[in-house]
Image (cartoon, rainbow, N blue to C red):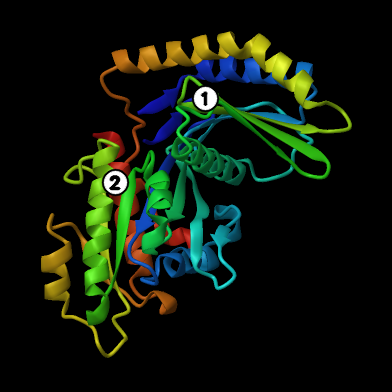
Amino acid sequence: MPFINFATKEINCKIVYYGPGLSGKTTNIKWIYDHIRPENKGEMITLATETERTLFFDFVPIEVSNVKGFKVRFHLYTTPGQIIYRASRKLILKGVDGIVFVADSQEDRHDANLDTLDDMIENLKDYDINIEEIPLVFQYNKRDLPNVLPVEVLRRDLNRWNRPDFEAVAHKGIGVLETFKEISRQVLKKLKS
Amino acid sequence: MLNLKPEEDKALREILNNLAQESRSKMVLLIDKSGQLISRSESPAFSSDDVTFASLTAGNVAASEALSKLLGDKDLNHMFTETEEEGIYMILIDGKFILVSIFDKRVSNLGIVRVKIKKFYSKLVDTLRSIEERIKKESAVSADINPEDIDLDTLFE
């Protein structure tokens, strides 16, 4: 749920990067964090294990000033992808305004993509969020690897709602910005409706 | 959609400022359970990033609440975290918001903070409920923002 303060002229929106373990959710927001101007970002928080697997969530606040006198703040969160962290994933979805589903394009990770999408749909239901209505973008990551599925297959199996989707190589920044721009656009558009 | 009008923002700030002053807290924050910072006391002594603080607090409370449910308890009401020099006291308001007091342990203590929160609690609940009532009555809020007005490219180096 976006939060608007008409006194301080601030709009706050929550965007969650969801997807199976090791699909590149943290890589996406880390790339954004590393390339954004210092004056437009807050502190990046990573709650990870010693082996850099996300334990609870990563968080990056991004500020856009002077949009018709308003300051728009996007709060980017990632979920922990590993199956065992189902309970934590659900907590992070609370109050979500937009979702980026980061899929792993590799053939042997496709079952994980499907399981995680089912898990996301279930969690959204529990919060009474209709997947048909919430801003949603799909990203097919790791397109530089040799054993990837064709985009058409990923699209058919995952993007059942015909939402905007992007191919990406997140560690090189390919497709990262496009994905972020699209989800931001959808979230702001929803704000007006 | 949660939103605050200037007079509501002022009313909340006033409560939080008075609470911070009377409880001798460094800072008092009001956060919603999804991690959005709703309001805060005016606290020049607090230098940390309040937006980040809010998101971590919500995560912390959400995890503790889930733990408490796993143990069979109905709800989590409040929690306390201590660092070497500071105390962080968090209490749930109406099951939807989190009120946080950060205090220097040499200046205040948990007892004073809890007593003072008790004093301001019903005023804070009433204010929040009246804001929610007003939002319910309104059909839609327009922040008059066009996605096209935001040039996200300028954000990046």
- Location of the N terminus of chain B (image quadrant): top left
Q: Is residue A50 left or right of residue A146?
A: right
Which chain hosts label 2? A
Residue A32 seen in render: yes
Type of the residue with mark 1 = Ala
Percent x, y for residue A163? 17, 57
Q: Quick one: which residue is furthest to the right in this view? A: B106
Compared with B59, B9 (above or below) is above
Say which quarter of the image contains residue B129: top left
Q: Quick one: which residue is furthest to the bottom in this view? A: A146
Q: Quick one: which residue is furthest to the front in this view? A: B72
Percent x, y for residue B2? 40, 27
Residue on which the image places disc 1: A7
Residue on which the image places disc 2: A123
Say which quarter of the image contains residue A80: bottom left
Instruction: Identify the residue shown where x is 56% and y is 14%.
Output: B124
Residue B18 seen in render: no
- Depth check, mark 1 against mark 2: the one in front is 2
User: How packed is label 2: few (under 14 Cα within 10 Å), some, or many (20 or more)?
Assistant: some
